[in-house]
Image (spheres, helix red, strand yellow):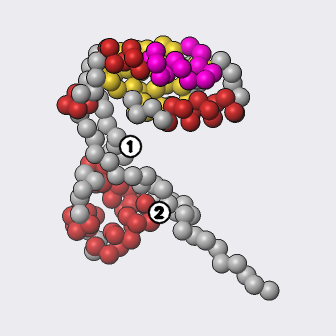
Amino acid sequence: MKVKKEDTTNRFEPVDKTDLEILKILQQNARATVKEIAQKVHLSTTPVHERIKRLEQSGVIKQYAALLDHTKVNRGLMVICYVSLKEHNRNAGSKFIKALNELPEVIECYNISGEYDFMLKVVEANMDSYYDFHVNKLSQIENMGNVQSVFVMGIIKQTHQVLW
């Protein structure tokens, strides 16, 4: 009888105190070298490198990204859109999500509870371009119900860090 070897490549292992320290450093500076991180967590580079790879493979670290100042790349208007769907079934929701994922103007989307089904974070150059997006793209998605737009007047706090 053949025994199948268990695949452990994506198995989640709980993070320990050292992993949390590494994650804090990477959230502050994703370009930090393994050597710099190793010095800060008081380990050699090999175990730090192995920990980072494990955190990536297990999905704790989802990706590395550059955070942009939207105003400096001609996306100075930020809008929070609350969206409700007409129909609430798996198929309708899946179609909406698929269509939404094809809109580059939508930089975040949350499935929420309450009066609305989704909360979107949309960035556009100005009010005219947002109007065009709203009328010609967002409102054209199948099963679209109600949309309420809230215009961001200023950003008080914006971070990607979840550990402190």
Residue 67 % position (x, y): 28, 41
Quadrant of image for the N terminus: bottom right
- Tell me the amino acid under the disc marked 2: Gln
What residue sits 46% from the left and 55% below the top? 60
What residue sits 46% from the left and 18% below the top? 136
| Image side of residue 70 versus residue 146, left or right | left
What residue sits 39% from the left and 29% below the top? 105
Residue 152 in view, yes or no: no
| Image side of residue 4 versus residue 47, left or right | right
Residue 9 location, quadrant:
bottom right
Residue 97 location, quadrant:
top right
Q: Is residue 135 located in the magenta-colored stretch of the structure?
A: yes
User: CA separation, marks 1 and 2?
Assistant: 19 Å
The relative height of residue 1 versus residue 143 in the rendered view (above or below) is below
Judging by the rendered image, the residue that carries numbered circle 1 is 162
The relative height of residue 124 versus residue 45 in the rendered view (above or below) is above
Q: Nearer the viewer, residue 148 or 32?
A: 148
Q: Is residue 66 located in the magenta-colored stretch of the structure?
A: no
Q: Residue furthest front?
A: 136
Residue 131 in view, yes or no: yes
- Tell me the amino acid under the disc marked 1: Val
Q: Nearer the viewer, residue 137 or 47?
A: 137
The relative height of residue 84 versus residue 164 in the rendered view (above or below) is above
Residue 135 % position (x, y): 46, 15
Quadrant of image for the C terminus: top left
Judging by the rendered image, the residue that carries numbered circle 2 is 57
Q: Residues within 10 Å of mark 2 (few under 14, many from 20)?
A: some
Residue 111 % position (x, y): 55, 30
Q: Which residues are magenta?
A: 134-146
| Image side of residue 114 versus residue 69, left or right | right
Q: Residues within 10 Å of mark 1 (few under 14, many from 20)?
A: few
